[in-house]
Image: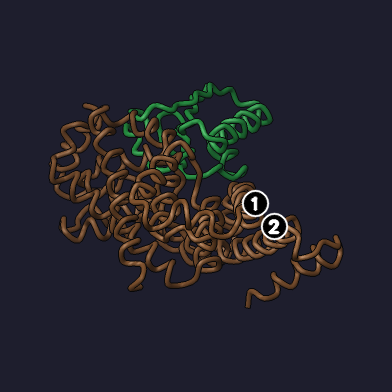
C-alpha cells in the first residue's frame, strides 16, 4: 500500500493530477491511498514551491505540473 | 504589420456580414473582430516563443538567486523576477513560503508577488499591440516601481511581525541557515525537444486560461467604443476631477480580473478620453488588488499585515494615477 499525497491549492491541475494517479494505480493494480493536501504547512514541510506536487510515501517526487503518465507508472511500480 | 487584422475585420464585418462602418453595431463589431483576431494570433505566437526561451527558468532557481542577494539590490531583483517568471496566482502561497523559508526578507518576497500579476509577457504584449511602446514602458516602470516601493516599505515597518507564526518560524530558521542547500537539485541542462514540449504545454495552458478573458475584455472595450458617445468620459471623468483616480482604484477592487481582460478595456477608455493615470490606476487595482488573492494570503498572514498591504497598494495606485495625470502633458 502506497500513500500518495497530491499537494495543491485545489486548482484544476491539482485535481487532474490526483485523478491521473488514481487511474494509473487502478490500471496497474497497485493499492494506493490518495490524499489531497492543501494546507500551507504541508507545502512548507515538503519544500514545495509550485503545485501540483506529488509525494509518494513521504518523498517528494514531482512538482509544478501534471506529471507525465510514464512517470506515474514508474513511481507506482518502483 | 497589424494592418492585416484591420483588413480581416473589414472583410468579415463590412463585406461578409454587410454592416457599415457608420452604424454603432458595425463599428463595435469591427473593433471586436480586429482586436480578438490580433490578440489571439499574437498570444499563441509569443507565448510559445517566450516559453522556449525561459523553459529553464523555474521558481526554485529564482529563489536561490534571491536568497543570497544584498538587500537593496534584492528589491529590484525581486520585482524584475516577478515580472519575468511564469506564475499563476494559485501558486502564491507555496512561493511565499518557499521564499520565506529560504530566509528571503518579506519585503523582497512581496516585491516579487506584487509585481508578478501586474507585469507578465501577455500583458506587455497586449499593451504594445494595443497602446504602443511608450505606454507599455510607462506601465512597466510604474508597475515595478510599486512592487519595489511596497517591498521596501514592508521591511521598513518590520512586517514579518505580522506573519502567521509557522511562517515567521520558517523565516527565522531560513535566516539562521547560512547557505541555502537545495534538497532537490534541478536538472540544469535541457534539450531543444524538452524546450519545445514545455513551450507547447505552456501555450495551451496559458491560452486555455486567458482566451475567454480576451473575449470578455475586448467585448467590453467594443461596447465602450461603439456605444459611449465621444467626449462623455472626458467631460465626466477627465483631468479636472481629482477624485476620479481613487474612485477608479476602488472600482477596480471588486472587479477581479487578470491583465489580459483589462488591457483591451484600457485601450477603449484611453481612446475615449479617460486620462492615462486614471486608466492605469483602474487597471492595476483590478489586476493586483483582489479579494481572492487576499483570501489566499490570509493563510500565511495575520489580518493586520493584510490590511497594511491592501492599503499600501490602494495608496500606491492612487498616487501613481495622480502623478501620471500630472505628467501626461509632458510625456
Give how far across and how far down residue B282 sits, in percent.
43, 49
Indicate the chain on which mark 2 is placed.
B
Chain letter for green, please. Answer: A
Cα distance between the residues tagged 1 and 2: 6 Å
Foreground of the two, A14 or B309 = B309
Q: Earlier in the sequence, mark 1 or mark 2?
A: 2
Above or below B281: residue A59: above
Above or below B187: residue B159: above
Classed neighbour count for the residue bearing mark 2: other residues with Cα under 10 Å, few (<14), some (14–19), many (≥20): many
* Residue B28: image tag: 2
Foreground of the two, A56 or B139 = B139
Q: Quadrant of the C terminus of chain B?
A: bottom left
Chain letter for brown, please. Answer: B
Indicate the chain on which mark 1 is placed.
B
Q: How is the image coloured?
A: by chain
Q: Which residue is mark 1?
A: B223
Can you name the residue that lies furthest to the bottom here?
B1
Q: Residue at x 37, y 51 (%)?
A: B241
In this picture, residue B115 sits left or right of residue A32:
left
Q: Are marks 1 and 2 in contact (CB under 8 Å)?
A: yes
Give how far across and how far down residue B235 sits, in percent.
47, 55
Q: Residue at x 15, y 43 (%)?
A: B175
Q: Is residue B214 visible?
A: no
Foreground of the two, A51 or A24 = A51
**Looking at the rendering, which quadrant does residue B160 occupy?**
top left
Classed neighbour count for the residue bearing mark 1: other residues with Cα under 10 Å, few (<14), some (14–19), many (≥20): many
Give how far across and how far down residue B144 sits, in percent.
32, 58
In this picture, residue B285 sits left or right of residue B33:
left
Foreground of the two, B9 or B239 = B239
Element marked by disc 1 = helix
**Looking at the rendering, which quadrant does residue B71 occupy?**
bottom left
Amino acid at each position: 500500500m502506497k500513500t500518495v499525497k497530491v499537494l495543491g491549492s485545489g486548482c484544476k491541475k491539482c485535481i487532474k493530477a490526483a485523478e491521473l494517479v488514481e487511474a494509473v494505480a487502478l490500471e496497474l493494480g497497485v493499492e494506493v491511498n490518495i490524499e489531497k493536501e492543501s494546507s500551507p504547512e504541508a507545502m512548507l514541510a515538503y519544500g514545495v514551491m509550485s503545485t501540483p506536487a506529488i509525494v509518494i510515501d513521504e518523498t517528494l517526487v514531482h512538482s509544478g505540473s501534471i506529471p507525465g503518465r510514464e512517470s506515474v507508472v514508474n513511481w507506482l511500480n518502483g | 504589420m497589424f494592418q492585416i487584422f484591420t483588413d480581416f475585420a473589414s472583410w468579415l464585418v463590412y463585406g461578409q456580414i454587410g454592416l457599415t462602418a457608420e452604424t454603432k453595431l458595425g463599428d463595435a463589431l469591427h473593433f471586436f473582430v480586429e482586436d480578438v483576431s490580433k490578440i489571439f494570433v499574437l498570444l499563441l505566437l509569443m507565448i510559445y516563443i517566450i516559453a522556449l526561451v525561459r523553459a529553464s527558468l523555474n521558481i526554485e532557481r529564482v529563489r536561490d538567486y534571491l536568497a543570497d542577494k544584498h538587500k537593496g539590490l534584492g528589491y529590484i531583483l525581486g520585482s524584475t523576477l516577478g515580472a519575468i517568471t511564469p506564475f499563476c496566482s494559485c501558486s502564491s502561497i507555496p512561493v511565499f513560503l518557499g521564499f520565506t523559508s529560504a530566509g528571503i526578507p518579506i519585503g523582497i518576497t512581496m516585491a516579487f508577488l506584487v509585481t508578478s500579476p501586474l507585469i507578465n509577457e501577455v500583458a506587455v504584449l497586449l499593451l504594445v499591440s494595443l497602446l504602443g511602446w511608450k505606454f507599455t514602458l510607462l506601465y512597466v516602470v510604474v508597475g515595478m516601481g510599486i512592487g519595489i516601493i511596497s517591498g521596501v516599505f514592508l521591511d521598513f515597518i518590520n512586517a514579518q511581525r505580522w506573519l502567521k507564526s509557522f511562517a515567521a518560524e520558517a523565516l527565522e530558521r531560513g535566516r539562521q541557515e547560512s547557505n541555502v542547500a537545495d534538497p532537490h537539485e534541478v536538472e540544469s541542462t535541457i534539450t531543444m525537444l524538452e524546450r519545445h514540449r514545455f513551450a507547447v504545454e505552456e501555450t495551451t495552458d496559458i491560452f486555455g486560461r486567458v482566451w475567454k478573458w480576451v473575449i470578455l475584455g475586448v467585448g467590453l472595450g467594443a461596447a465602450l467604443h461603439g456605444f459611449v458617445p465621444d467626449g462623455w468620459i472626458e467631460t465626466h471623468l477627465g483631468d479636472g476631477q481629482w477624485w476620479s483616480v481613487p474612485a477608479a482604484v476602488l472600482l477596480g477592487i471588486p472587479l477581479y480580473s487578470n491583465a489580459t481582460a483589462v488591457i483591451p478595456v484600457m485601450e477603449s477608455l484611453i481612446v475615449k478620453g479617460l486620462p492615462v493615470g486614471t486608466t492605469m490606476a483602474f487597471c492595476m487595482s483590478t489586476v493586483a488588488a483582489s479579494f481572492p488573492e487576499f483570501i489566499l494570503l490570509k493563510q500565511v498572514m495575520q489580518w493586520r499585515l493584510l490590511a497594511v498591504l491592501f492599503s499600501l497598494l490602494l495608496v500606491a495606485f492612487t498616487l501613481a494615477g495622480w502623478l501620471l495625470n500630472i505628467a501626461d502633458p509632458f510625456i
